[in-house]
Amino acid sequence: MAMPVQTQILDEIGTRLSLITTANGYLRAVAKLERARLTPFKNGDLPAINYYSTADSFVDKGHTFDKRSLSVAIESYDLTRDAIFDDVAQQLAADVTISINRSSASPAVTDDPSISLGGIVEQVTVTSITPAIGDGQKPYCGAVIFLEIVYKVKKLDPFTLIS
């Protein structure tokens, strides 16, 4: 069964996020990756990432296509006690930002960038990074990274991306 273009884009993002490992040169290795998780992660799940779309908007139209913008939130969390939480949040955001710009075939930090999700979309922009911090005996630290993804879809066909 064909998947809507938004799902295709989110699947590619998930593939890239799943390759955040220390073996690939990232600062952390993701222990748990979920899409649109509704419940908080437990300490044993961390470092963890939750990602989901927040909006899909019309941008422009052409003769045979519509240009759209998909907003995506990526929440990245880890435990911290002694490190400055803002520094940890920026490290988490850096891992996510780098991974979004690496292909699944060449996911290492040192590999050449693969922008535009490998050419399936027109543009991926990190629009903001917001630090997050929890409290308690085992405080967590996190960052919420917001992306704007501009893509083209075949007119009247929600299943066909145009690259």
Image: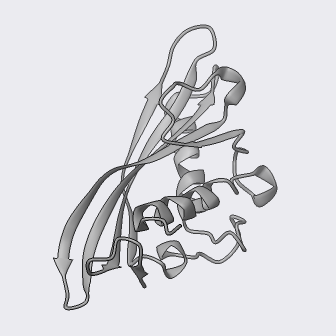
Can you say whether 124 is above or below 72 in the image?
A: below
With 13 as the anchor, is 6 left or right in this view? Answer: left
- Residue 27: give x, y in percent of width and height: 69, 47
Which of the 4 image quadrants contains residue 80?
top right
Outermost residue to the right:
23
Q: Quadrant of residue 88?
A: top right
Q: In the image, is residue 118 above or below residue 148?
A: below
The relative height of residue 154 versus residue 7 in the rendered view (above or below) is below
List x then y, in percent, for residue 144: 44, 41
Which residue shows up at 62% across the image and 8% down it? 137
Instruction: Residue at 48% x, 78% y: name it.
Output: 120
In screen coordinates, is 129 left or right of 46? left
Quadrant in the rendering for residue 101: bottom right
Task: Return the residue found at the far bottom.
Answer: 63
Number of marks in the rendered image:
0
Q: What residue is shown at x 72% (from left), y 74% (from top)?
A: 105
Residue 95 spot, x, y in % from top left = 60, 52
Which residue is at the front of the view, 150 or 28?
A: 150
Quick check: 14 left or right of 119?
right
Q: Which colour assignment does the render follow?
A: one colour
Q: Residue at left 67%, top 21%?
A: 43
Query: Does residue 126 lie above or below 75 as drawn?
Result: below
Say which quadrant the C terminus sits in.
bottom left
Which residue in the rendered view is the most extreme toward the front?
1
